Image: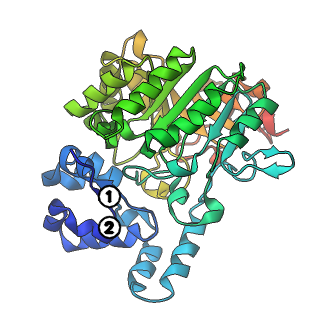
Amino acid sequence: MQYQSYSLKNINKIENLKKLPIDIKESIQTVGSVLPFKSNNYVVEELIDWDNFEDDPIFTLTFPRKEMLDPIDYIRVKSCFGQNELRNLVTDIRTKLNPNPADQIEKNIPMLNGEIINGIQHKYSETMLVFPSKGQQCHAFCTFCFRWSQFSGVKEEKFALKNSEHMVAYLREHPEITDVLITGGDPMIMRASSLRVFIDAILESGIKTVKTIRIGTKTLTFWPYRYLTDSDSSEILDLFKRVTDAGYHLSIMAHICHKNEMKTDAFKDAVKAIRNTGAIIRTQSPVMKHINDYSENWSEMWKEQVRLGMIPYYMFIARNTGSHRYFSIPLLRAYEIFKNAYMKVSGVARTVRGPSMSASPGKIVIDGIIDIGNEKAISLSFIQGRNSEWVKQPFLAQYDEKAVWFDELKPAFDESKFFFQR
């Protein structure tokens, strides 16, 4: 299959879209002016059930919906089409949508020789995130994406590293870093030659402290042909094998939201091709209303992932940014979905952790609901923390059936602050 990209500019080329009601097409154009839209022919032709598009999870995952914007903002954008003030209005709305959650600009960007390195994040001591400038796009955009601001065209909100020298220099200064996560966007949208620049920089640096290279990607489900028939597919696979042959652990962090994303032969063939290089595939996704907020999807997805040789890794809570208002579910509901799915899989699938929130202080997981006397509380702990001493230290929050993000929780039992806030 030859890759065909769809944006708002050429969206009319999607034949199936022509059959949809006018109001649906209008909502795609309107919301897509604020939250970036992009899709491709594989997603459109192989993954979406157009006869049932209203309830199709992959349609919702990739095509904007009217409800993803505040109703008043929707009307304002719609009424401004073709007018000069549209750009300023869109900028104003985007600013209100928390474009960079969890203090990722304020607290995650490191310094090297007194200068900020905009294309690197270093939140947890052992792990460094790298954002290659040529990897800050995707084969298709997820409507929930917490990095939607990467694609909005606002330079100040974009992470992008143009060369590998700063990455290597920072690694030399920080021997505590064992894992390098190459992320985006989607680094697998890069040509093999561009990705090789960053991979080779690590392999040839002589740095012994780095043990694991991770690549965060959605290509397995949005464009599996990246590993099968693209002109440089064999170069990509050879590069993966070079990493594992050099003694590094290579982990492909695959974002898979719904079991329907794994149904094609191309997906299964791509999984096999990657595994044959010695790389490990770990899977993760947020739990979201309208897409995967039922336990059967997760248990079936984890079982199939294990059968194909992948490792279930995380169930996340969708970050409080962008279209969060449309996708968010109560934290306690997320916990019930995770628990009910976890119950239905064997031990080999129970590598998965969650539901986890990547909040400002760290990755916080909901461990359960406890009863103390006549009062319920939510038990939480850190999987990762800005301070590593916080990890695995349990703490309690007030029982709250409405809270959808960590910032909405309050300490239990009349405590004024959580332990890490004192």
Find residue 344 and report its image quarter.
top left
Of 412 and 98, nearer the camera is 98
Q: Which residue is mark 1?
A: 63
Q: Are marks 2 and 1 in contact (CB under 8 Å)?
A: yes
Q: Position of residue 335 (x, y in %)?
A: 49, 32
Q: Position of residue 389 (x, y in %)?
A: 79, 24
- Give the answer, above or below, for where 401 lies relative to 235: below
Which residue is rendered at x = 31% and y = 41% of the image? 231
Which residue is rendered at x = 76% and y = 27% of the image? 388
Q: Could you say whether the residue bearing mark 2 is in a helix, strand or loop? A: helix
How many marks are shown on the rendered structure? Answer: 2
Of 313 and 126, nearer the camera is 126
Q: Residues within 10 Å of mark 1 (few under 14, many from 20)?
A: many
- At label 1, the amino acid type is Phe
Q: Is residue 150 left or right of residue 418?
A: left
Q: Earlier in the sequence, mark 2 or mark 1?
A: 2
Q: Position of residue 2 (x, y in %)?
A: 23, 48
Q: Position of residue 369 (x, y in %)?
A: 56, 27
Find residue 365 and report its image quarter.
top right
Which residue is rendered at x = 27% and y = 50% of the image? 3
Of 294 and 45, nearer the camera is 45
Q: Residues within 10 Å of mark 2 (few under 14, many from 20)?
A: some
- Would residue 272 be seen by someone viewing this image from the given angle? yes
**In the rendered view of the protein, which quadrant contains the N terminus?**
top left
- At label 2, the amino acid type is Ile
Q: Could you say whether the residue bearing mark 1 is in a helix, strand or loop? A: loop
- Would residue 374 be seen by someone viewing this image from the given angle? no
Residue at the bottom extreme of this rendering: 83
- Give the answer, above or below, for where 112 lies relative to 419: below
Query: What's the mark number on residue 28?
Result: 2
